């Protein structure tokens, strides 16, 4: 028999049985198609090995007028600006209290109870203290001019470390030779330049006073004046975890000048579906009756306990950002020789916190924000109406043209609003070339700028459709693609179902309750749109599916990412791992999240195909491989290699059998032929395989290996009917 080519249709098809898809590919992971042939996807390299707090859900890249290349990073806990590989915390401030917070510590524990009335805190929020003193209750009376029980070798000054001498009798609880911290010196009028103890004070008379001591290994001022993540205790109290264990001297209030700076409420890391038993955090309540819910009481998911998503947009070089269900915030870069990335974002509405003010008619609560590039108008989707504080999920409001701060509609400006009529909530919006697309949970609208007096015109494009989540849509080359709850869609002037050869595979094993975690992104260098989603038994993103819009084929795999951005300002697409690292995809061959890098396991397997017409058994006795290793980075003696596996089967219902030589590994010293565009990794492979049907698989799991498959061939001899 002549050599039989192993040439398969591009793309992966899981819509039928493996034999029904004869001539195609059936399974894969971390493989893409390029010019119709499968190849291993590119690896990834860490942007930096600095990390951040929380699960990242949003990336936004822009360059300021000073040329600073900045990256907005929104997590469920914080909001950062990445610059030069460092993450700067610009999380907006919700509230600042002065002289109202007090501390209470328990000896032997690193848990400190903070009391601060009406703090509005919830578990997971962050607070920063300043002005705190070390905690202490140990009071020692010092008499100067007569023999003392304590030999102090340092000045008695607040903030001074002292060491207790072994001479004399120490008060109960104090340990000789231990370093203590002077918290408060009261009534000590001696010269601070004069030491006590070994050198007498050269004056006549007795000086007496009281000092308070705290063990420096306990709750010192340095320990307390830091940022902490809190745990809710009651309406007026919460707990923080200090890096040190409290000593017997660490139970005081930390001073009377404590400033507590509270960041905006943190959000959830996963989506909380529905209400009732088990939904939301323990003992949480509503905004109207905070922390009122107890054991077994129904719960309503809200801003602080729902999945935290961010939307970001540029107003020129300014960044406008919004936590879903929260206020609108503005961050402005510095005008000097640094971007000034240490200043928190400012709320655009005074009802948000009262700390920063612009226009009180700016929405104080919003689900999504973007800026129209055509008209320079800030648009809030799903927000509160004028004079109201309750979110209307179908209301759209916009600012005046060329202004992010003027939202009050008058005859002389273009500020205004419109309420959509279809659906129950606005899910997301996306700016395209000529219009803004707005998705509700059941419809798609077109929003087009028309100028005064109506400013925006709205057109219903399609009804009775779905979208998986706020980040499930992408636009490329003027065409918009998105993932629905049970299929994929495309909009190119009209809404259509996007044919998908993996529809059954994806939507039969998907966690729809976590749809708001799903996200889409482009990889334009390879003409791809990626969707990341949660499999049925997972509450975190663990899979992806790719549509190659140039070749119109699909493929899929497993990968844990929480956000994605394909920005030409950074050169490579960026993904965020669950280890809180931002990585550049396609920038390496291996997994660069570890030091040293680790190999990426990549494979693709064909559907079953008949040997000949499938009537007789065939005996495969040799194979002619066809593969290239262009782009490999491995060097001698570890040359790039892949495994070829040929899996025989008698009938579609039978188990795959084994062959005498099922695995083929390259033996060619590839390092000597790097200059060739196409190489054969070996000339012939001799096998002993017998069956009516075969499935072919290529797999790699070694460092520095990059490959693209060509058209291998097998040599088959007839081998009877039984």
Image (spheres, rainbow, N blue to C red):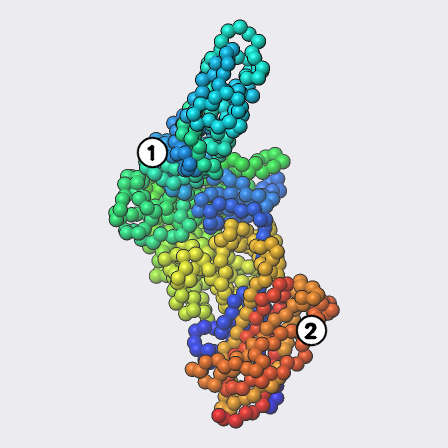
Residue that badge 2 annotates: 668
Relative to 527, say whether 177 is above or below.
above
Quarter of the rendering containing residue 241:
top left
Choose between 557 and 396: the one closer to the eye: 557
Q: Residues within 10 Å of mark 2 (few under 14, many from 20)?
A: some
Quarter of the rendering containing residue 586:
bottom right
Q: Secondary structure at mark 2?
A: loop
Relative to 689, say whether 306 is above or below.
above
Q: CA distance from mark 2 to mark 1?
A: 71 Å
Residue that badge 1 annotates: 236
Choose between 405 and 691: the one closer to the eye: 691
First reached walking from the N terminus: tag 2 or tag 1: 1
Residue at 50 percent across and 20 percent down: it is 168
Residue 153 position within the rendered picture, expressed as x and y whole percent measured from the top left: 56, 21
Relative to 403, say whether 485 is above or below.
below
Residue at 58 percent across and 90 percent down: it is 717
């Amino acid at each position: 028999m002549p050599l039989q080519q192993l040439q398969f249709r591009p793309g992966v098809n899981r819509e039928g049985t493996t034999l029904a898809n004869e001539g195609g590919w059936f399974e894969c992971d971390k493989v893409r198609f390029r010019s119709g042939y499968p190849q291993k996807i590119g690896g990834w390299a860490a942007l930096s090995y600095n990390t951040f707090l929380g699960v990242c859900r949003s990336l936004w890249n822009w360059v300021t007028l000073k040329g600073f290349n900045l990256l907005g990073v929104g997590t469920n806990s914080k909001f950062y600006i990445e610059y030069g590989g460092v993450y700067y915390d610009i999380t907006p401030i919700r509230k600042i209290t002065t002289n109202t917070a007090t501390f209470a510590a328990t000896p032997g524990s690193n848990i400190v109870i903070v009391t601060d009335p009406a703090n509005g805190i919830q578990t997971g929020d962050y607070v920063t203290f300043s002005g705190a003193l070390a905690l202490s209750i140990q009071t020692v009376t010092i008499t100067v001019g007569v023999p003392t029980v304590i030999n102090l070798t340092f000045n008695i000054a607040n903030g001074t470390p002292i060491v207790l001498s072994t001479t004399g009798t120490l008060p109960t609880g104090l340990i000789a030779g231990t370093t203590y911290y002077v918290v408060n010196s009261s009534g000590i009028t001696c010269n601070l330049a004069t030491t006590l103890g070994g050198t007498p004070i050269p004056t006549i008379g007795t000086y007496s006073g009281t000092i308070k001591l705290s063990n420096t290994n306990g709750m010192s001022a340095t320990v307390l004046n830091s940022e902490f993540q809190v745990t809710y205790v009651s309406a007026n109290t919460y707990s923080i975890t200090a890096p040190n264990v409290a000593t017997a001297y660490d139970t005081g209030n930390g001073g009377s000048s404590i400033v507590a700076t509270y960041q905006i409420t943190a959000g959830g890391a996963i989506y909380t579906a529905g209400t009732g038993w088990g939904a939301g955090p323990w003992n949480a309540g509503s905004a109207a009756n905070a922390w009122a819910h107890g054991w077994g009481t129904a719960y309503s998911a809200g801003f602080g306990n729902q999945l935290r998503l961010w939307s970001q947009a540029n107003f020129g070089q300014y960044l406008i950002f919004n936590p879903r269900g929260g206020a609108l915030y503005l961050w402005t870069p510095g005008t000097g020789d640094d971007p000034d990335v240490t200043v928190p974002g400012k709320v655009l509405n005074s009802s948000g916190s009262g700390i920063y003010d612009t226009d009180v008619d700016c929405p104080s609560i919003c689900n999504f924000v973007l800026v129209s590039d055509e008209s320079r108008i800030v648009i809030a989707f799903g927000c509160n109406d004028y004079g109201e504080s309750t979110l209307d999920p179908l209301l759209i409001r916009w600012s005046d043209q060329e202004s992010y701060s003027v939202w009050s509609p008058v005859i002389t400006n273009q500020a205004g609003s419109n309420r959509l009529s279809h659906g129950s909530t606005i899910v997301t919006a996306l700016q395209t070339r000529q219009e803004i697309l707005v998705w509700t949970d059941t419809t798609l609208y077109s929003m087009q700028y028309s100028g005064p007096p109506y400013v925006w015109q709205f057109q219903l494009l399609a009804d009775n459709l779905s979208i998986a989540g706020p980040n499930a849509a992408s636009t490329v080359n003027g065409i918009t693609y998105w993932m629905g709850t049970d299929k994929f869609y495309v909009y190119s002037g009209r809404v259509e179902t996007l044919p998908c050869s993996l529809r059954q595979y994806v939507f039969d094993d998907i966690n729809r309750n976590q749809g708001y975690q799903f996200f889409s992104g482009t990889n334009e260098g390879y003409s791809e749109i990626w969707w990341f989603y949660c499999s049925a038994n997972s509450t975190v993103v663990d899979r992806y599916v790719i549509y190659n819009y140039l070749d119109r084929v699909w493929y899929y795999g497993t990968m844990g990412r929480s956000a994605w951005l394909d920005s030409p300002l950074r050169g490579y697409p960026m993904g965020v791992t669950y280890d809180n690292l931002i990585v550049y995809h396609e920038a390496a061959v291996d997994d660069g999240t570890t030091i040293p890098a680790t190999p990426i396991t990549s494979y693709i397997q064909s559907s079953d195909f008949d040997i000949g017409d499938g009537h007789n058994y065939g005996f495969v006795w040799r194979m002619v491989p066809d593969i290239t290793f262009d782009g490999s980075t491995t060097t001698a003696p570890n040359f790039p290699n892949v495994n070829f596996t040929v899996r025989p089967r008698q009938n579609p219902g039978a188990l795959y059998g084994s062959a005498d030589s099922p695995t083929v590994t390259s033996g060619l010293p590839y390092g000597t032929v790097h200059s060739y565009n196409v190489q054969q990794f070996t000339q012939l492979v001799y096998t002993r395989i017998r069956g009516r049907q075969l499935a072919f698989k290529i797999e790699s799991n070694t460092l520095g290996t990059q490959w693209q498959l060509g058209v291998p061939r097998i040599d088959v001899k007839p081998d009877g009917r039984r």
